[in-house]
Amino acid sequence: MDHALFQYLLRLGDTTLILSHRLSELTGHGPALEEDLAMTNVALDLLGQSRRWLTLAGEVEGRSRDEDQLAYLRDAPEFRNYLLVERPNGHYGDIIARQFLFDVWHYFLLKELCSSSDERVAAIAGKSLKEVGYHVRRSSDIIVRLGDGTAESHARMQEAVDDAWRFAGELFADDEIVAAMADRRAAPRHSQLWPAWFEHVRSTLQEATLRAPDADGANHPAYRGGTSGRHTEALGYILAEMQHLQRAYPGAAW
Amino acid sequence: MNVSASPYTIDEVMHWLSQVPDPEIPVLSVVDLGLIRDVAWDGRACVVTITPTYSGCPAMQEISADIKNTLLAHGIEQVRIETRLAPAWTTDWMTPKGHEALRGFGIAPPGEKAIDVSGITRRAAGVVVPCPLCGSSHTRLISHFGSTSCKALYRCSDCREPFDYFKAH
């Protein structure tokens, strides 16, 4: 089995899956009808992308696990999503901060993956990129509206960005899996995504009259571990809800 | 591939496909939507290659089933649906007939070429989306997403009606 590719695909598949689940928790609970629709539509895009990544992961693994088995029958230590996306929803500023920091990274990553030496990866990335370009434009819009809104929305948005910031650094970490993928030009080194990411985030926050936190603040090792299966307690609760039906009724299908 | 064994021409199959509606927007056929990449015969099996629209579009499964059932109903013995991801589906592949059908249905068709839509730049000015109901170009974006992933919600400042815009993608 191609260990590095399998692990890398799990990271992509799990990260989109878990964020999709977090956003789908907002179905019927958005602060406004338009936001409710937007969040759940983004969740749907991410879920579709996750299915492609996990299906490919299953093929690469070669143990005939399909997308459903990977999504529903692994426990938390086997999940490889970044910690940022398992963060609880909190208030709407928190949700937007998490989404914005993630969307910008997701966009620049997919852009690089479009020229992956693995054409299966490039195909999924190319398809996802168009959806994610739209996600970034939307979350950038909303962050400007909330940051440059009332004194209250400004303060809460700033607090939310500062709070989510700690978890951004993990997205840019180069470990042995990323290095193995980069060596064969199947993926970029994630550290190389930082300058473009930081520039877009910084300029958007500036437009939103918000302060960009220090780059160093994103680099604390305590807020890493998702890609090697060390998660926060939040993931267990997500999986309990997401996997309940399949665990209680093994093999249940539509 | 054994062409002599195929009982119908590609044109005939395409004609039948042009009668398979999109389940969400029934005035559009799967051909008008630009989903069909290829039709070919593999022995007695008709192989239809499609490019899925949005990654999470729940209609794709139904569309595949509808294509299969329609062709089987026309007497084709075996139908196989294959999926091609790259190049990614774009609204540039929609037919002019599809654009007209959308407008007639009250949905504004994509207003620009989709070539650069994957860009990150916020497009505050954006593209002008004429109202499909009264034709006015005084319209504004209400919501980035409408009832489905492929649509955004607009409102006409003249006739005051809200309407869906089929996003350039």
Image: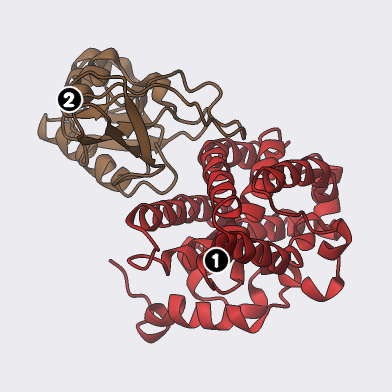
* Quadrant of the image occupied by residue A230: bottom right
* Callout 1 amino acid: Ile
**Count of numbered tags:** 2
**Residue A181 visible in the picture:** yes
Chain under disc 2: B
Residue bearing the label numbered 1: A18
The x, y position of residue A81, in whole percent, is 65, 65
* Marks 1 and 2 in Cβ contact (< 8 Å): no
Q: Residues within 10 Å of mark 2 (few under 14, many from 20)?
A: some
* Quadrant of the image occupied by residue A125: top right
* Callout 2 amino acid: Leu
Report whether A48 appears left or right of B61: right
Residue bearing the label numbered 2: B133
Q: Nearest the camera: A139 or B82?
A: A139
Report whether A101 appears left or right of A221: left
* The hue in which chain A appears in the rendered picture of the protein: red
Report whether B98 appears left or right of A80: left
Looking at the picture, does residue A214 appear above or below residue B167?
A: below
The x, y position of residue B73, in whole percent, is 10, 35
User: Which mark is in front, 1 or 2?
Assistant: 2
Quarter of the image where the N terminus of chain A is located: bottom right
Q: Nearest the camera: B122 or B82?
A: B122
Chain under disc 1: A
The x, y position of residue A2, in whole percent, is 73, 55
The x, y position of residue A3, in whole percent, is 75, 59
Mark 1: which secondary structure?
A: helix
Task: Give the CA separation, mark 1 to mark 2.
Answer: 40 Å
In the image, which lettered chain appears brown? B
Looking at the picture, does residue B167 appear above or below residue B55?
A: above
* Quadrant of the image occupied by residue B146: top left
Looking at the picture, does residue A60 appear above or below residue B50?
A: below
Q: Residue at x 17, y 39 (%)?
A: B69
